[in-house]
Amino acid sequence: MTEAPAPGNEPRTPEPKHPAASGCTPAPAPEQPVPAPDPAPGAGSRPDSVSGPAAGPAPATGEAVAPDEAVAGWRGWGAVGAVALGIFCLITSELLPVGLLTPVGADLGVSDGTAGLMVTVPGLVAGFCAPLVTVGAGRLDRRWVLVVLIALMAVANLVAAVAQDFGVLLAARLLVGVSVGGFWAIAGGLAVRLVPARHVGRATALVFGGVPTASVLGVPAGTLLGELGGWRFAFAAVGGLGLLTLAALVLLLPPLPPTRTITFAQLPALLRRNRAVRAGVAVTFLVVTGQFAAYTFVRPIMQDVSGVNAAYVSTLLLGYGVAGVAGNFLAGARDPYRTLFTVGAALTVILALIALVPGAVAGTVLLLAWGLVYGGVSVSLQSWMIKAAPDDAEAASSLMVAMFNLAIAAGALSGGLAVDGISVPAAPLAGAALMAMAAVTVRVTSASRTATRAVVGAAAPAAVSARDASPADRR
């Protein structure tokens, strides 16, 4: 009995071995394209994988994909929502002091530059804790790791709300950094275990949506609460939201035992072998450092340079947030190289102008443009890393999270030194210089990628032609 051919392998009509003898060249069958050469082992982590199609974030390396029938739809999506809310709370908590530097400094008797340490310290701690917690929690149930981290954040904010000394407040901010680094690094790979495989891309986007939403809405909302009830009320409100998130995680997250662990050796190995990951980490540092060198001091910039009345700063920051959400959606499905080059170039101009051009109208327009452009940064950086290392997505994300948070600390610190040592306009000018360097880095990386693809594309037809040539043609 003859076995039927498998789909896609139907027998083809034999072609002449020597086409030249027939006087014409047979047209290739369109339904049977020449297969591409098999990728070398580990090709998914090569730099040129950045240019591949993005059908959605790839499942993280260390987590198993849950089968459709094993996931209760409402509970899976509820768990995804609880994790996204946790990310929102944590990033809001990390950046909350941005809009409260002046009242906190005045109340506790420190300068604006010293008050900027409230952003520097948690960012620095979070940068180190992202890989440390990811590796150290490898044998623990992810559910309880996230619960403990969110509880730590809630308690830290409640302590900050009643602190009577800047040292106590800074210690509470250190605990926030531990929570941010560990939670963000672990949560990024959980979507594949909470929803059916066909919904993983959407769920991962929702989880990471907590990052830009917190950056562009959490800070303005916290600033508004500070205006209405004082800076202590703003910290207490974030702590209360953390307790609500804690309850949601306990109720909605299923048990999440570890499936694989990441070792410390994997992280530097990924950096060594993957140029696109290295470039992504460098761009993350430059863009985020430039952003927070300026944005940490946006309140004194608006008041001292643009001349905006202090009573309107919180309203302007809410406008910045709305513009940022729009920027996030505009950038979401676009090529990360083009988006980040545009971000770097545009923010170079915007930050330089906001430092040099006085006037409330100019300051308002530039602030809204700033929010619109920066809104696409987080999603673009995450897309870059997932495309750069689809087979090592969890490790690559851990590196990006670490650098993102270290860059927040570096930006706040450098901006504080510029403000205290030179003047308030020096902070956005420093940010503009770093944004220019980021744009150049993206351009160089993009040109290298294009050249690599051109070489590969030119070599492939030659290889196919040599393989398909007849023995007579090869002589």
Image (cartoon, rainbow, N blue to C red):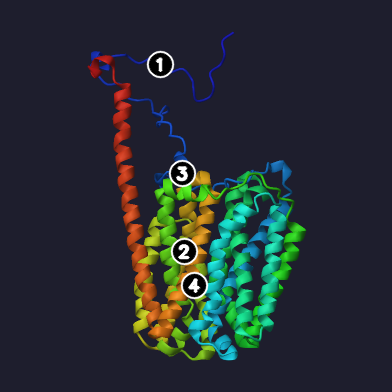
Q: Quadrant of residue 372?
A: bottom left
3 or 2: tag closer to the N-terminus: 3
- Callout 1: SS: loop
According to the picture, the residue beneath numbered tag 3 turns out to be 45
User: How far is disc 3 from disc 1 in space, using C-alphas?
Assistant: 39 Å
Residue 13's mark?
1
What residue type is disc 3 on? Ser
Specify few, some or many for label 2: CA neighbours under 10 Å numbering under 14, 14-19, or 20 or more. many
Specify few, some or many for label 4: CA neighbours under 10 Å numbering under 14, 14-19, or 20 or more. many
According to the picture, the residue beneath numbered tag 2 turns out to be 377
Number of disc labels: 4
Q: Which is more toward the observer, 27 or 293?
A: 293
What residue type is disc 4 on? Ala
User: How far is disc 4 from disc 1 in space, using C-alphas?
Assistant: 60 Å
The x, y position of residue 328, in whole percent, is 50, 64
- Callout 2: SS: helix
Between tags 2 and 1, which lies in front? 2
2 or 4: tag closer to the N-terminus: 4
Relative to residue 365, is residue 134 depicted above or below?
above
User: How far is disc 3 from disc 4 in space, using C-alphas?
Assistant: 35 Å
Residue pictured at 45% horizontal, 80% vertical: 416
